[in-house]
Amino acid sequence: MAAVNHWDTAQHLLLVILGFFVAFAPRYLPIKIFTQRKIPEWFNEWMKFIPVSLFTALVVKDVLVSPTYQFDVVHHVPELIASVIVGLIAYFTRSMALSVVVGLASVFILAVVL
């Protein structure tokens, strides 16, 4: 039988406070460090690829990989069509907001139609 949680209010509050610091530190420390130093140009060039890389990794996994971690295109046709539409919108407009709205709308419409 699993043990029952016997934490009191102070322990829950301590957990929330510690969670705050764990979540806050990775956001605050780079700002604090890099505002006092000059960032090398190579680092700025390298950082330009991070958002695209993360976005691509998330999209490719959701669009081309099944829940059993197999390459699956057949069951993801609406997502594939929507990703092509979003890619074109993002390329020509360079608008993240418009891309997200068009992507959500196209996935919804294609899922209902297909």
Image (cartoon, grey):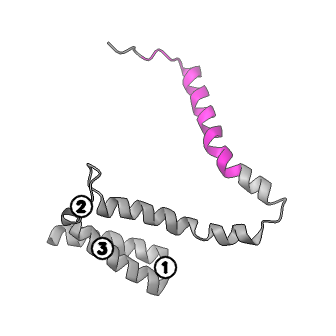
Q: Which mark is residue 95?
A: 1
Which residue is labeled 2 in the image?
Answer: 72
Secondary structure under badge 3?
A: helix
- Magenta region includes residue 9: yes
Distance Cα–Cα, label 1 vs label 3: 16 Å
Mark 2 secondary-structure assignment? loop
State the CA–CA distance, disc 3 to disc 2. 16 Å
Q: Which residues are magenta?
A: 5-28
Q: Taking 89 as reference, is 21 left or right?
A: right
Residue 96 shown left or right of residue 23 in the figure: left
Mark 1 to mark 2 CA distance (whole Å):
29 Å
- x%, y% of residue 45? 67, 72
In depth, the one of 88 and 70 nearer the eye is 70
User: Disc 1 vs disc 3: Cβ atoms closer than 8 Å?
Assistant: no
Circle 1 packing at 10 Å, graded few (<14), some (14-19), many (20+), is few
Q: Residue furthest left?
A: 114
Report crowding for label 3: few under 14, some 14 to 19, many 20 or more residues within 10 A (C-alpha).
Answer: many
Residue for point 66% across, 48% down: 26
Residue drawn at (51%, 69%) of the image:
52
Residue 102: quadrant of the picture = bottom left
